[in-house]
Amino acid sequence: MMFDTSQMVLLISAFWWVAYFTRLIHVTRRGNLRHMPRLYLWLSVYGTGIIYYLHNYTLELRLQEYLDFTGLPLAGLLKVAISSGVVAYGYVLVARRYTTLQIPKVVDYLVIPMFVICIVFMIGAYGNLPYITLQIISNICVSVINLTIAIALRPSMRSILRHERGHVRRVHHIWFVIFMISSALAALLYLIDGADKLINGVSVIDSTLYVAAEIFRSIYMLALAILIGHDRYLFWIYYPVHIVTFIRLKQLAEQLQRETQAKMVYTMPVLGFQTLLKLDLAIYRLFITVMDLYMYLDSHSPLYKRIRAIDQADASYDTTIRLLTRLR
């Protein structure tokens, strides 16, 4: 597959660093970076931005060319140290100290030896193997470490989502799950692609699997950018749901208009890209229209009976909307 992933990574990196430093300045002014675990999390996010650059074969090699005078594979060592040591394993340590997440000790027995072996191997093999081979091997090591930690965190994350309370906290964890899943998929693809390159001696850097891994990495960078932003950005994950809700309510309102021969008073056409606030307002107006119009249906109408049952259920607004969109 002929696709220059380095250009994509550079473009998303530019967006990422602008978003990161903009938000960091705001948080710093509020004095919210003085204590753990917040301080670690922001440093971890900073490290993730560096990892995003270093995981790309072309960009890592370009950096290593400037550092070659040291006689060490510093670019690769930075990648392994930040990715596996600071971000991945560091999160395990912080989670154990400041959360109720239960992370098994077997993670330590797997991650620490693999981390040390990878560092020692890279230093010893540098100059004796092509740098692309070192890159592939280091990416495989990092992928195995990150997948190990992701698998270890899975039960705890499921438990948190199951017992999560509060709309903002729930949607926050949804974005975090997207970040975890996309990063795990990227690591899995790197692992498969690296093994294939080593076994079959593939010389094409931007192979199909590698490009797919880079795309998933870009997805988790987007999810992370939203996570560190203002809470209002978290809710964009519901945008497709809002569109579907609007369409179904509009269809229901139009059906009621036909059966009652009434005219819709509140209309708000959704053309092109709309903000969530405008969609919320459009959905609310359609809701009012539906609840007004159904009263003019024949009391023996099946549609009247179904809407009447929903109306009398005395459910919350969100639940009522969801029930109305299920009507056919």
Image (spheres, rainbow, N blue to C red):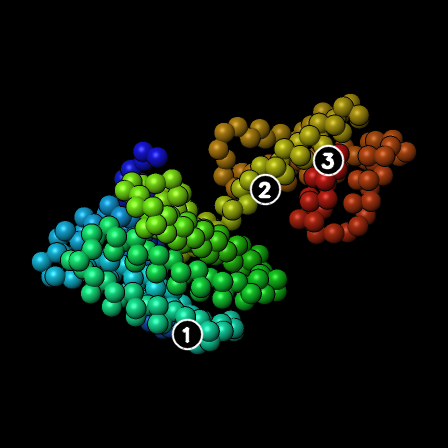
Residue at figure coordinates x 44%, y 64% from the top left: 148
- 97 vs 11: above or below: below
Name the residue nearer the viewer: 263 or 306.
306
- 43 vs 277: above or below: below
Under mark 3, the amino acid is Val
Percent position of residue 230, x then y:
43, 54
Identify the secondary structure beneath mark 2: helix
The residue that label 1 is drawn on is 109
The residue that label 3 is drawn on is 290
Percent position of residue 161, x then y:
58, 61
The residue that label 2 is drawn on is 241
The answer to whether residue 165 is seen in the rendering is no
Residue at figure coordinates x 34%, y 46% from the top left: 200
Say which quadrant the C terminus sits in. Answer: top right
Whichever of labels 2 and 3 marks the residue nearer the N terminus, that label is 2
Separation (CA) of disc 2 from disc 1: 43 Å
Separation (CA) of disc 3 from disc 1: 60 Å
Whichever of labels 2 and 1 marks the residue nearer the N terminus, that label is 1
Identify the secondary structure beneath mark 3: helix
In the displayed structure image, the side of residue 96 where residue 323 appears, left or right: right
Under mark 2, the amino acid is Val
Name the residue nearer the viewer: 177 or 167.
177
Percent position of residue 14, x then y:
28, 45
Separation (CA) of disc 2 from disc 3: 19 Å
Name the residue nearer the viewer: 267 or 83.
83
Q: Single out the mark in the foreground, 2 or 1.
A: 1
Under mark 1, the amino acid is Tyr
